[in-house]
Amino acid sequence: MKKFVWPFFALGLSFCQEKVAPPEPVLPVPHERQIAWQELEFYGFVHFNMNTFSDREWGFGDEKPEQFNPTALDARQWARVAKEAGMKGLIITAKHHDGFVLWPSAYTEHSVKNSPWRNGKGDLIREFVDACREYGLKAGIYYSPWDRNHPDYGKPEYITYMRNQLTELLTNYGEIYEVWFDGANGGTGWYGGANEERKVDKFSYYDWPATHELVRKLQPNAMMFSDAGPDVRWVGNEHGFAYETTWSNLMRDSVYAGMPDFDKWASGQENGTHWVPAESDVSIRPGWYYHAYEDHKVKTLPELMEIYYKSIGQNSSLLINFPVDRRGLIHEKDVEAILQLAAKIKEDFSINLAQEASFEASSDRGKGYEVENLNDGNFDTYWTTPDGQIQASVEMDFGKPVSFNRFLLQEYVNLGQRVKAFSLEKEVNGTWEKIAEGTTIGHKRILRFADTEAQKIRVNFLDGKGIPVISEIGVYSAPALLFPPKISRTPAGQVTLTAAEENLDIYFTTDGSAPKPEVNRYSGEFDVPDAATVQAIAVDPKTGKSSGLGRVDFDLAKGSWKPVQADSNAVKSIDENPQSYWTSSKNELILDLGKEISLKGFTYLPMQARYPSGYIAEYGLEVSLDGKSWKSATRGEFSNIQNSPIEQTVRFDPIPARFVKLKGLRTTDGNPSTFGEFGILTR
Ligand code: FUL
Ligand code: CA
């Protein structure tokens, strides 16, 4: 109860009352190093190594040290960006699958010491840890157990090599907070020129127990990551999403790094034997490494917010990757995106309405475990119930009606993860109505729901592995996420506008004028069969604030067009879905537009799938009135399409056309031409 008590009375009471014994832990419980680590919550990955220069995701191992040559490398920029983004640490790819190492290791020549960078005198791990320390960040190391360069990979000698390198990394660079062992390993590779496939028994080859012991000896506080932990586990996907039900408990002895059916284990287990919390890793772009052709695919703010809530909000830490570019810098677009995320997180959690609320619990355990501990901003103080009372509730009174849409809970997991089911209710005229519910809580759980108004709310702990032990509760009113609405059109010409959040209003125009709040509100799909510019803004009805402008220049709808070629997949080049594409073995796309038009140009969107193939670099466009005799309309090149596979626009003098033929005269990689989306211009 957070009510006024006479100070003397309170004092007297505290003298005569003994602090009650804490609850028995529910096993497993975290180790001290895990308790310290979970406070970090948000940290960054730096994927920067040979792949940056070979433009690959997984190098084969036959790359040359000379290829590693950043032009303006500045690890302090990485650290500055991470710090500004609210991250607490950074982890760098000291060695990836291709085997190239970022420090002058005594055990290999495949290293920065033989690269042109800093005339072979550079040590990137040194620069990295120094930069981290300067900015108050923890420094971590990614070390790939798989090595496609090393001649001994697959033999016992390689394990010695790996341990020698780990010893260098964990001895010479001060405190390392996390050591990241990748589960991807074994397969084809260069292997010192052998050029073959080498399969290893992922369970036994690395003798993990001995490797772990070495890391422990050298860095007792470091968290070791892999699919199987031992200290922190993979979340099972690379989207950055943990699960509605996420346990930090894991049947660790049944799991090993790189095991094929890890999916089953990724969300942890209620009856897991060991404490191995989840870490959600995700790249800010599709690839882990930098590729100029992904400059237009940096994750948007709505996507990043979704990641935040599904990782940190679902009992996981969040590891966001920066694919550092060839200069050796985090790209401007990535910087912009991560700072937008940081600003939005700050905004969402700027005012904790629970701080001023008075709390009342159905019961408490006694002195030291009172309900006031729930909103004192201190994780180490907690509320809990008498032994055996698994079901309990906590009521919060804000003193006046308030509006909110986020509910945050933290379990005092130092005594084990317990809660299995809980619900959140609000009081409406003396009765309780459910707002939201959840299963596990763990270190942190954040529920999102529509704006709700109430003076009193209550959380009910319905089921658990033991009595609830709760550190903190937070209630927030996150401002709407104002982001330009998505504008899409079906081939038939129906336009849909979508805002980042449901409760926003959308206003739009189709005549080229700027959309204004309160004028022409979007209420559902509308038809745009002809050429028109659709512009839209999202507006928060509560504040009147508007998003930036969304804009698409549409031309004729494609509904009545028909591919002339027999392949049923050809339609994917005109289905208005940028993700689908058609591969033409003849390097041409022929369309019947259904009627004669005056053609003034065309658009070509290369395929947008993760790994590019068949981008047209040199094109020819031909037109026909009868589908038989063809005439050239234009020819040319898409100069920078390899690096920037965005929609290409070509204009020319008007020419009558009923049929069009886009020819791929040359593709960037020599593969058959692919067509993501084709469009025409009539204005
Ligand atoms: C994966 C690797 O194969 C990727 O290249 C990347 O390093 C990612 C973080 O882990 O398993
Ligand atoms: Ca507390």
Image: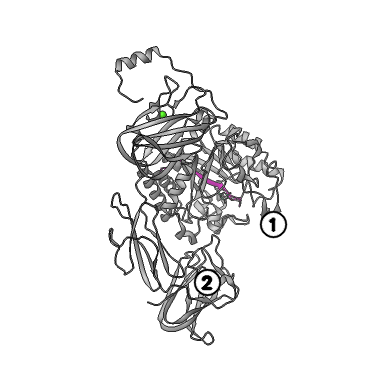
- Report which quarter residue 496 is drawn in: bottom left
Where's ligand 2: which quadrant? top left
Q: Position of residue 487 (x, y in %)?
A: 40, 62
Question: Residue at the bottom extreme?
Answer: 629
Say if 360 sits above or below 266 in the image. above
Q: Are marks 1 and 2 in contact (CB under 8 Å)?
A: no
Q: Position of residue 90 (x, y in %)?
A: 48, 43
Q: Nearer the viewer, mark 1 or mark 2?
A: 2
Task: Inspect the image, locate mark 2, and give the three-letter code of the amino acid beneath it.
Answer: Ile
Instruction: Tell me the residue at 63%/54% (across/down).
Output: 61
Depth check: give the residue in front, 636 or 371.
371
Magenta residues span 86-101
93 sits to left or right of 494: right
> Which residue is identified by label 2?
616
* Quarter containing the N terminus: top left
> Which residue is identified by label 1?
195
Q: Residues within 10 Å of mark 2 (few under 14, many from 20)?
A: many
Calculate the distance from the C-alpha at mark 1 to the C-alpha at mark 2: 32 Å
Task: Inspect the image, locate mark 1, and give the three-letter code of the amino acid beneath it.
Answer: Asn
Instruction: Tell me the residue at 69%/56% (across/down).
Output: 193
* Quarter containing the C terminus: bottom left
Decide if ligand 1 comes within 8 Å of the CB at mark 2. no
Can residue 10 be seen? yes
87 part of magenta stretch: yes
